[in-house]
Amino acid sequence: MKSHTFRINKFQHAINICRRSLFISSAGLILATANVYASDTTYQLNIEPQTLSTAITELSAATQQHIIADGVALAEQRTIQVKGNYTTEKALEILLKGSGFVATKVGENRFSIHEVGAALARDNEIERIAVTGSYVVNEPIDTATGLGLTLQETPQTVNIITRQSIEDQALTSLTDVINNASGISAKAYDSSRNAFSSRGFNVDNYQIDGVPVQWNGAQSAGESLTDTALYERIEIVRGATGLLTGAGDPSASINLVRKHANSSELSGKVIARLGRWNNYYASVDLGTGLNESGSVRGRTVMVLQEGDSFVDYEKKSKQVFYATVDADLSNATLLRLGYSIQDNEPKGSQWGGLPIFNSDLSRTDFDRSASVAAKWSSWASTHKTFFANLHHSFSNGWELVAHANKNVSTADMYLLWVSGLPHPVTGAGMTASGSRLENEREQIDFGVRLQGMYSLFDHEHEFVVGVAKSDQDFVYYGYEGGGSKTAKPVTNFFEWNGEFDQPDWGQKYISQDYTTEQTGYFAATRIHLSDKFKAIVGARLASWNRQGVSYGTDQDYGDDDVFIPYAGLLYSLNDSHTIYTSYTEIFKPQNAVDADDNYLDPLTGLNYEIGLKSTYFNDALHTNITYFQTQQENLAVVDPDFVPRPDKLAAYKEADGVESDGYELEVVGQIMDGWKINANYTAFEATAEDSSGTSNTVNTRFPRKIFRLFNTFEYNQFTLGAGISWEGENYTDIKSPLGNVRVEQPAYSLINLMARYQHNEALSVQLNIDNAFDKEYYSQIGFYSQLAYGEPRNISLSLHYKL
């Protein structure tokens, strides 16, 4: 294969801003690429976001191909970046994605660009597949390596929930997304908090536009309720992700990719939705140019949600506002500024769940609507984010990216804790106590990244180097007069009506007050050993330290200059199939000390993968087969040889930790014109050895097997969708008066349906039915020996209007 080099610059991702034909109006992505003149010549490209007409001109110059626009208005649209090794056909596919235009090869070194309708009417001798409303992303991403590689080029398992998937399935929160993503699952703590898990480990790594943020589900300010309207897509890299995220568990990293101001013309979308239990949801997404040239652009997103719940006394209220400005300071420099706020103001919030056992240790049996909340209880939360990103491209093709972010999250909680074992007949035996709590988390991030290409041994290679620093202050408050001081017996819990006098809250005091600092220096390169064989090597030098007080205990621990390696190999069998293997790490400080009062070394998470990534139909359909092994080492366990003393009752030592191994299968994209699919299956085992050498299954409240499928079929003005979400059994061993008792959630399936009617180019009507067969299941079981029910059948009807 030949390789040519052409560097142009990168600024931003872009989305389509113009309305197109009915065939593409529900999705915004159509491409038909001819194969009869297929060529394997690739070109090293780095084409910056700009007008489509200019990008086509530069592509033509770089590839020495004649690309004829045939009179269509390419100058009205802006493109995303095209960076990497691409054939002319593939580069055109990326540039034209979402534009309403298609490219066909009409001769040797000659391409023609047409409106969608004209292209689809061409002679059948030109093979093509038209992709509408894509479930796949073919553009480069930075979530795993920072090198700006496509999914095919990334030696890890990456699942992307696209904007089309989000809208087709009416996914309004981060938890909704996780419940429909590959290889990852969610379980509730209560009505306002959710925990996520992947490959046997809890997920504690999050990014927004590739910038790590620290979220703690147990000390939540409602992060798992984050609204999806702010984001263009959500990327999930499974396994260890220490190269870019630093500290955490070897589970996954979730990257929320913001919407940005890409349109110089007025464009947008309005969604109004009415759902069961009096739920009202409305979102407005508008973008436009702010000056005559379009070099300064603005975008705003607003969301309002109000409604009740299937759970008694619970009411939802959410307001979201987001505004961002993209400014082309020059042809080489882009500045992005933005602000967002999400305000959650629920009522009837639950703290914990329903009792699992009666006082005679028989199992309880509640209606799914049963609640342990008081009518006045609330888990209100607010999230504010300020951000500034600067992208500068140098004349040699290298790019500098700098970011600054400030996140402020607060929670104001008026909660009721109900616990005990009710008598199976009288309902007596339960106790209720109120608590008022607050928390505030402020995090400031700074980072700089430099990336580009260099020549060595007759090949071009990618390189990235960067530094990131994060400071987080966390304060947790309680109020005197709450807790056990307000405890009262519940006369008959089976007649609970949410009535409980709100205590007179006393003096405010601090329960936790600590600061966490993280610093990371990282570098990575992709080496082109040959046209088919690539190697990626990288490392991060990370520091993580915490100081402060937590419930009366001093917090002063962490680790400095921890070396985190990254390595991957990829071999292209042909243009469609790539085999890969990778080794990645992550670390997690621990505050356990040994017999000599030394902090133990951090937990080290390791991830090995080997897999096959394939693409079909001109990248319209992606498949992935992966085998993985994930480990956690240096786990703190009690030192049995330590002799307790008055000032120290226990000591710890390092031991082998948890090991998880399994496989994942994924098919996502478009099988044929109008038929889109997203299907995946995950199966793994996660075990740890105790001090006696016995192997025990761990993190059992999350399923070991997950199968998810959602597909849609478009015919004329109609789109029909159907999906299944199946989770294998999970269980929790809890303590009872008779000793440990295992409570189980059997395997279950949820069926989801969708139908959409496209009235015209702008207006569509969509019906979603979740849990269509009204399956009864638990959203959590065993957390503090309690349970919660999952949502029954839910029906929603929405109007979508596209400007």
Image: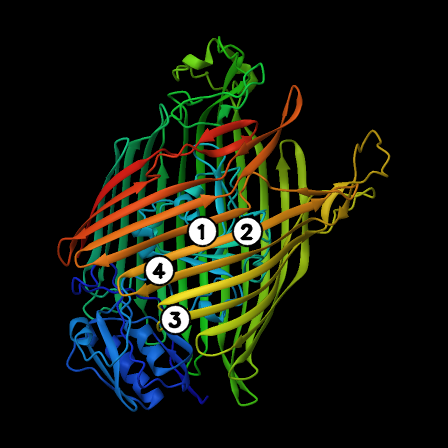
Q: What residue is pinned by disc 1?
A: 406
Residue 181 percent coordinates (x, y): 43, 51
> In the rendered structure, which amino acid carries the disc numbered 3?
Tyr
Q: Is residue 458 left or right of residue 269?
A: right
Whole-Å distance between the Cαs marked 4 and 1?
32 Å
Q: What residue is pinned by disc 3?
A: 616
Which residue is more in the foreground, 473 or 595?
595
> In the rendered structure, which amino acid carries the disc numbered 1?
Lys
Q: What residue appears at the point 54 percent right and 84 percent down from the top-left corner?
A: 530
Q: What residue is pinned by disc 2?
A: 683
Residue 191 percent coordinates (x, y): 43, 32
* Disc nearer the start of the sequence (4/1): 4
Residue 549: which numbered mark, if any? Answer: none
Q: Secondary structure at mark 4?
A: loop
746 versus 254 height, above or below: above
Local crowd size for mark 2, using a 10 Å CA cut-off: few (<14), some (14–19), many (≥20): some
Residue 316 percent coordinates (x, y): 33, 33
Which residue is more in the foreground, 732 or 392?
732
Whole-Å distance between the Cαs marked 3 and 4?
14 Å
Whole-Å distance between the Cαs marked 2 and 3?
25 Å
* Disc nearer the start of the sequence (4/2): 4
Instruction: Write down the quadrant of residue 310 in the picture.
Output: top left
Colour setting: rainbow
Q: What residue is pinned by disc 4?
A: 135
Q: Residue furthest left?
A: 760
* Disc nearer the start of the sequence (2/1): 1
Q: Is residue 255 visible?
A: no
Instruction: Write down the quadrant of residue 483 in the picture.
Output: top right
163 versus 276 height, above or below: below
> In the rendered structure, which amino acid carries the disc numbered 4?
Tyr
Local crowd size for mark 1, using a 10 Å CA cut-off: few (<14), some (14–19), many (≥20): some
